[in-house]
Amino acid sequence: MTVRRVRKALLGAILIGLVACAGAYALTGEFKNTVVSATATMLPRELPAHGGAPVTLSSITRIKNKDGSQPGALSSILFQLDKHGFVETRGLAVCTMAKLANTTPSQARKRCGDALVGKGVGKAKVTLPGQATIDISSPLSFFNGPKAGGMPTLIAHAYETVPERKTLLLPITIERVSHGRYGFQAKVTLPEIAGGYGSATLAEATLGRTYEKGGKKVGYINGYCSGGRLQVHGSLSFSNGDFFPATLTSPCHTG
């Protein structure tokens, strides 16, 4: 995967490095004590020149402090997706917030398995008052949700165990936009982790599935190849004002 830097961080220079990672490349951004690395991959590489074929989008984001301390709280993420692709939900099962309320990861996937369009894992550091810092993790599940204003939505599901057991649900609307290379975007405002005492350190997810519609297999995410690449832009905002942008390009070719 190749990486293209599009702008500087608002609060300081971003150090960009290309790091080999399973045949892909990772973008690394550094500001003061915080280091953020991200990768994004779209598969398969071979796609039609027009129309669209099912693809999967995988991303990994890691956040750490250089001195090993707990990083600042991640407050929001903005994803922008290549306009040479689209999300298809017609004929796909729908899950709701009410159905997922108070569920563990396994219960959520059992209740809404037909609407599951992605999986992953999230990790965080938590420092409760008077206690040592601990690491926690949760499976992540992404379900096709009801449309909002005609736009497709996702419901992200996670489950935390400290300071108490709690289901975290996050509705995400996939908006249609016209921003140069990008045709879709999703703005994600993140909930507090562990009552505000936690900070995200890892978010790893893969989105995409095929399902039957009208007797044919279609993809939840579909893409076609134009200009030899598909592209994703993301930006991470932290509660302390830090801001990390990244543009990642995944190569493609026509069959």
Image: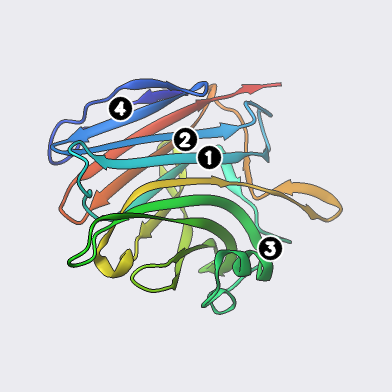
Q: What amino acid is at disc 1?
A: Ser
Circle 1 sits on which residue?
Answer: 58
Q: CA distance from mark 1 to mark 4?
A: 20 Å
Distance of label 4 from label 2 (alpha carbons): 14 Å
For the residue marked with disc 2, what is the amino acid? Ala
Image x and y of residue 158, in percent: 47, 63
Earlier residue among tags 3 and 4: 4
- Name the element at disc 3: helix
Quadrant of residue 104 within the rendered picture: bottom right
Vertical relation: 160 (above or below) 98:
above
Q: Please report whichever mark, 1 or 2, sits nearer to the chain's N-terminal start.
A: 2
Q: Position of residue 26 (x, y in %)?
A: 39, 28
Alpha carbons under labels 1 and 2: distance apart: 6 Å
The way the protein has been coloured in the rendering is: rainbow
Q: Is residue 22 left or right of residue 91?
A: left
Answer above or below: position of 99 versus 207: below
Residue 75, visible in the rendered structure:
no
SS label for mark 1: strand
Q: Earlier in the sequence, mark 1 or mark 3?
A: 1
Question: Is mark 1 in CB contact (under 8 Å) with mark 2?
Answer: yes
Query: Which residue has dot 3 on it?
Result: 113
Q: Which residue is at a point 57% across and 51% down the rendered structure image?
A: 119
